[in-house]
Image: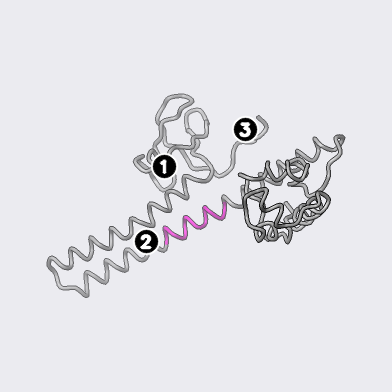
Amino acid sequence: MDQIKIGRFIADCRKKANLTQMQLAEKLGITDKAVSKWERGIAMPDSSIMLELCDTLDISVNELLSGEKIDMENNNQKNEKLLLEMAKELERKNKTIWATMWVIMIVSMIALFAGIFAAAFLIPEGVWQLVTILGICVVFLIPCFYALKLEVSVGAYRCRNCGHEIVPAYSEALWAMHMGTTRYLKCPECGKRTWCKKVLKKHERDLKD
């Protein structure tokens, strides 16, 4: 999606509605700075107020996301194009989140081993050495929990038995046995527990459905 184009479209529609940025902001319960960011292409309207914005400007959501008025004849074509663009944008975000998750895990692992190594050689054997090592391990768990949250938030886990794609709750993924990003989960479709591989993209048949 072209944020600059969408921003200009919002500005044009606002002016046609004889509204200032402040007046539009008041109708939506936001600040005029947020409206200014939209119109400059710096940010996009939040999904929670998108429908209200469209209603205020007398446009459709498709027109808002396209950044232009859409004729009925071209509506279906525009819909398909928007869905494709949104799918690509979601894929890019998922890949960014996935990369962030791995960076957190790798940095945390390096920090964990470096901390344990330092404690083992710099602190004399005894209670304080043990307490230090345990403290390092506890601190290491914090980014691991966050990394798991990122892992669960993108894509799905594909059932090895039936191919169904599972999006488990955080607690279910947390307590499931795992090997890397492959987790032992119960499939709601076939009812069997299998080692489910993490996938970022859905099957083509699922996208068509």
For label 2, the crowd category at 10 Å Cα-Cα, with few meaning under 14, some 14 to 19 and many 20 or more, is: some
Please tell me the numbered disc located at residue 15. Answer: none
Q: Which residue is mark 1?
A: 170
Please, what is the three-letter code of the amino acid marked with disc 3?
A: Asp
Q: Quick check: 167 left or right of 14?
A: left
Residue type at mark 1? Tyr
Give the distance between the C-alpha atoms of the residues marked 1 and 2, in whole angstroms. Answer: 22 Å
Image-quadrant location for residue 142? bottom left
Q: Position of residue 177 (x, y in %)?
A: 35, 41
Residue on which disc 2 sits:
109
Question: Alpha-carbon distance for marks 3 and 2?
Answer: 36 Å
Q: Is residue 102 above or below residue 193?
A: below
**81 above or below 111?**
above
Of discs 3 and 1, which sits in the foreground?
A: 1
Q: Nearer the viewer, residue 196 or 15?
A: 15
> 36 above or below 198?
below
Amino acid type of the residue that numbered disc 2 sits on in the rendered structure: Met
Range of residues picked out in magenta: 95-106
Q: CA distance from mark 3 to mark 1?
A: 23 Å
In this figure, which residue is indicated by the disc labeled 3? 206
- The x and y percentages for residue 64 are 75, 46
Check contact, mark 3 vs mark 2: CB within 8 A: no
Magenta stretch encompasses residue 101: yes
Q: Are marks 3 and 1 in contact (CB under 8 Å)?
A: no
Most foreground residue, 159 or 207? 207
Residue drawn 39% across the image and 45% down it:
179
* Sequence-first tag of 1 and 2: 2
Q: Earlier in the sequence, mark 3 or mark 1?
A: 1
Residue under the image location 52 percent in, 56 percent down: 99
How has the structure been colored for display? Answer: one colour
Disc 1 packing (10 Å; few <14; some 14–19; many ≥20)? some
